[in-house]
Each structure stands twice: as structure tokens, then as C-alpha cells.
Amino acid sequence: MKGSIPSETDKILAVLFVEFDNNYGIKLSYQVPENFIAEARFKVLENYFVTKSKQLHGKLIVTQMFNFQTIGIPTEIPHSNAVQNGRKVSIFNIVIVTKLGANTDPYEKILKKLISYFTIFEQEKQFLSSDGKNTRILGIINSIFHGINDHGYCCVNVIDELNVIKLSYVNKDHCVNPPQIKDSDVPIIISNLEESAAWDLTLRELYPFLDNQKPVRLLADLSLLDLVLVKKCIQSLIYYNLAFVVSPIRYSNTYYVTSAIQSIMQDPALQDECIEYIKMDERYPSPSWEVIFNLYETFQSGIKLKQVFLYEKPFMRNVNERRLVEFGLLKGILKRLHKYPVASNGTITGSNVTPELQEYIQHQVLDGQHSYDDICIKLNLKLEKVENDLDFCKNITIIQKLDV
């Protein structure tokens, strides 16, 4: 999965490839950019990069000298063809150099993943012990430097198109703890997923069906993927701030505006973000924040989206009403009112059971824990039918609750 672009404080200043050579000892073989670290400074640091103690192999070592910080993991990988080349192991370190105080956690994960790639490639392709290593290593550290800094990820064909290194920068401080995904949840994509889809096999199959309207259960059915896999994929997208989930957006839904609208009044950057998100047509002038604020204010006492569409006519102001709701739910400006049916006295039996209710009873959805959205997905029913069957049934109590 693609990562996030490092902040200026956390960007990579240089990437070094340091190795132990039988003839020269500890050697700085490659560095990107060239000549970043002088020979005299390297000599001071070399024993931190390739340690004499094998107990430190595989351990993260961070140094802070010369106004920069180095992050590396001394590594020893056995050669798969030691008989041919006369050497049994490669001892090396790929060192990432940053500003003092930069967050080391994302780079530790990158380095550990890179080492695992090197180990596999050596076992299968003699990656470190065969001719051609020099060009490959230089290409990899060059891709790490430019790819992570500019895009938050890098992708390198190492030997052929089937042997690819994929690394991404993930700062947990910027990630979101994903919620439990329900069958009725609708994923809303908020970032370009084309490149991410090339990385993740599940996402690659799911990607053509992601239209910000289909619920998770339908996405699984259309993509022929296991529902559990689809939910994990959506959670991963949420974790990386690439998506969020909402309940199905319908014109019959009722929404309420929250006090969070006041905080946006003091945040011009968020106002601009909102304007860009809800704009309907790029060819026409963007709606003003005052127009958008007034549209959100129409939800003050709870109102159906259909009423906003008919009476306020947001499309006349170049506002996409669906995306207006999406942005409101994402930022906590709006909350939706849900309906949860509960059988009177906990059960419905005997003559009280109508043919219409029988299906709901069999699927145990009249317990106050299943919203109308959940019931529609679980029983594969239209919302209109569920409302007709349950809204005015004397044996059913409807509890209405806002999103948590």
C-alpha cells in the first residue's frame, strides 16, 4: 500500500550502502546523493554501520553526529553459492540519513522489509553473491531516496518484473485506527488508488467496483472476493487515510448538523478543502463558503436530503449534494439518524406473526441491534419494503439513533 510523504523534518537526506570487503575492510560503496558524507566523517561512524559484535546484527542502530541522524540495521546474509564465489556471507548496512530528531519508526520498518527482500532474493537469485550486484544496489538506494521523499513509496524491478521491491513510508501519527466494517458500510475513496491497486492483490480485484456508492457486501459479491478479505482491505485503506466509510447515502435519509460546524468557521484551510470536495463542475465558479455554510445549516433541526435537494437546489450553486453529505460525515459536521426495529416484549409469536414479519424473525434482526441499512443488506431487500413492513407494524417499536 502507498504511504504518506514525509514531512520536511522527516525527509531523507541521504541513503548509504556500507559493506564489509575482504580486501578493504568496512567500505562506503554507494551513497545517494553522491559525496554526501566525507571520508573523514565516515571513518568516525563506520563501526556503527558494520559492527564487530554479531550480537548487534539485525538490531536498529541510530547515531546523532555531525548535525544529522543515521538509521541502520547491520545485516549478515549467508550466500547461496558460497562454493562458487569463495565467500560465505554478505555483511552490510543500508543506512538512511535524516535531520536530527526525525521520526525513526517508519524507516525502521522500511529497512527491515528491505532486508527481508535481500534475503529472499539471495536465496532464490544469488542477488548479493552474483555479478551485477553493484548496478542493482545503486538503483535500489537511488529509488529509496527519491521515491520515499517525493511520493512516500518506491517500487523497483530488481532482477525482472517478477522480482520487485515495494516500500512505503508510514507515519503512525498520521494514520487512523479503522473501525469494524459492517456489511452495509459504503467505502468513500478520498485519494487516487491506481498505484496502490498495483501493490495489493485484493485491492486490484476490488478497484473497478469502488464508486463511493456500493456497500461492502455488494463489493464482495461483484468482485468475487471473500467478504472478510474485502473488509480487511477497506480497513487498510482507512488506516492509510485513503478512504472512510459511511452508511448508504439516500435522499430519504435524515441528517442533523453538529456543533463541529463552528470549528470550520475558524479554519479557512478546511473551508477551502470543503469547497474543492463538494464542487460539482470545474467549468463553473466554485461555491462560496457562505453558501455551503447555509446549506449545512438547513440540517439544523433534522431534515431529509431530498428536502435539501428540492428546496435549496444546491446544484444551482455548483454544489454536489451527495458530496456535501460525504464531507459533512467525514468531518463530523453531519450525523445521520438511523432506525432500529425492536419486537414488542422481545418476541413476536402466534397470530401476531404476519407473512411479512416471518422473514425478519427468522433472521433475528428485530433486536434493536440491526439498523434498516443492515436489514436491507442481510435480507437483500429494498429500503422501501423494509419501511412498509416495519414502520407501522403495531408489534414493532422503532428506535431512532444518531451516528455515534
Image (cartoon, rainbow, N blue to C red):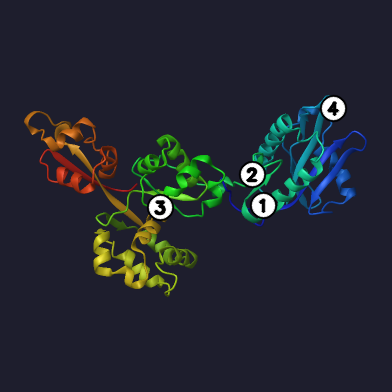
Q: Which residue is mark 4?
A: 84
Q: Residues within 10 Å of mark 1 (few under 14, many from 20)?
A: some
Res. 36 mark: none
Q: Position of residue 46 (x, y in %)?
A: 85, 41
Measured in 3D between alpha carbons, the distance from the residue under mark 1 to the one under mark 2, in whole angstroms, is: 9 Å
The nearer-to-camera label among 2 and 4 is 4
Seen as rendered, the residue at the extreme bottom is: 285
Provide the residue designation for mark 1. 147
Q: Earlier in the sequence, mark 3 or mark 4?
A: 4
Describe the element under mark 1 as helix, strand or loop. helix
Q: From what the image shows, is residue 113 above or below residue 288?
A: above
For label 2, the SS is strand
* Kind of residue at disc 2: Leu
Judge from the rendering whether residue 328 lies leftward or rightward of residue 124; answer left or right.
Answer: left
Q: Earlier in the sequence, mark 3 or mark 2?
A: 2
The amino acid type, in three-letter code, at marker 4 is: Gln
From the viewer's perspective, is 269 left or right of 99? Answer: left
Q: Nearer the viewer, mark 3 or mark 4?
A: 4
Q: Tell whether label 4 touches label 2 (CB within 8 Å).
A: no
Identify the amino acid type marked 3.
Asp
- Relative horizontal placement of residue 338, taking residue 331 as reference (left or right): left
